[in-house]
Image (cartoon, rainbow, N blue to C red):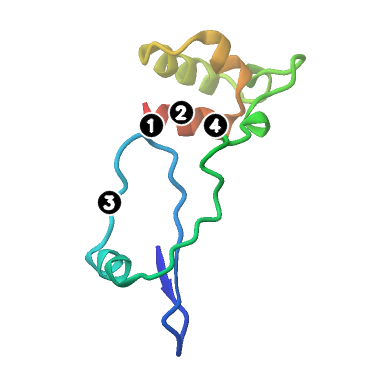
Amino acid sequence: MLWHVDKTNFHILGSVHVSNRPLPISAETVRVLNRTTVLAFEANFDAAPNLAPAHYKADDSLSKNIHEPLVSDARRLWLELGISREEFEGIRPWWAAVRRMNA
């Protein structure tokens, strides 16, 4: 999403991107980027993101936190992708959905 700060040449470009697929960029965004003289990033590209909040602690699991038959359906879909059962059990529902969507 591209925002323009009124009465300035300042733009803010933001996204939530969790896929290995290329992110489509609008023609307007390309136009703004082509005119850019200073570009700053808020992300540290030298460090991997902290995914600890996406995982359960050792004594908890996904199947303990969502109801059947959702657990069975989600596990079946997950395993069809060739992703391990251990990973499935160790992650929170929102991260399971993101991983499934991106696979």
Pointer 4: residues within 10 angstroms few (<14), some, or many (20+)? some
Residue 88's quadrant in the figure?
A: top right
Q: In this picture, is 77 found above or below 53?
A: above
Q: Which residue is depicted at the point 31% across and 70% down? A: 32
Pointer 2: residues within 10 angstroms few (<14), some, or many (20+)? some
In 3D space, how far apart are the residues under numbered discs 3 and 1 (Cα atoms)?
Answer: 15 Å
Question: Which numbered circle lies on residue 24?
Answer: 3
Left or right side of 97 for 21 = left
Left or right side of 35 for 94 = right
In 3D space, how far apart are the residues under numbered discs 4 and 2 (Cα atoms)?
Answer: 6 Å
For the residues labelled 4 and 2, say whether their Cβ atoms are less than 8 Å apart.
yes
| Residue 55 picture location, percent across and down | 65, 25
Q: Could you say which is closer to the camera, residue 55 or residue 5?
A: 5
Q: Which residue is depicted at the point 36% across and 16% down? A: 81
For label 1, the residue is 102
Left or right side of 32 for 2 = right
For the residues labelled 1 and 2, say whether their Cβ atoms are less than 8 Å apart.
yes
Q: In this picture, is 82 found above or below 91?
A: above
Q: In this picture, is 88 found above or below 66?
A: above
In 3D space, how far apart are the residues under numbered discs 4 and 3 (Cα atoms)?
Answer: 23 Å
For the residues labelled 1 and 4, say whether their Cβ atoms are less than 8 Å apart.
no
For label 4, the residue is 95
**Mark 2, secondary structure of its residue:** helix
**Mark 4, secondary structure of its residue:** helix
Pointer 1: residues within 10 angstroms few (<14), some, or many (20+)? few
Q: Nearer the viewer, mark 2 or mark 3?
A: 3
Reading the chain from its start, which is encountered first: label 4 or label 3? 3
Q: Which residue is depicted at the point 42% across and 27% down? A: 100
Q: Could you say which is closer to the camera, residue 27 or residue 80?
A: 27
| Residue 24 picture location, percent across and down | 27, 51
Quadrant containing the C terminus in the rendered view: top left
Residue 46's quadrant in the figure?
A: top right
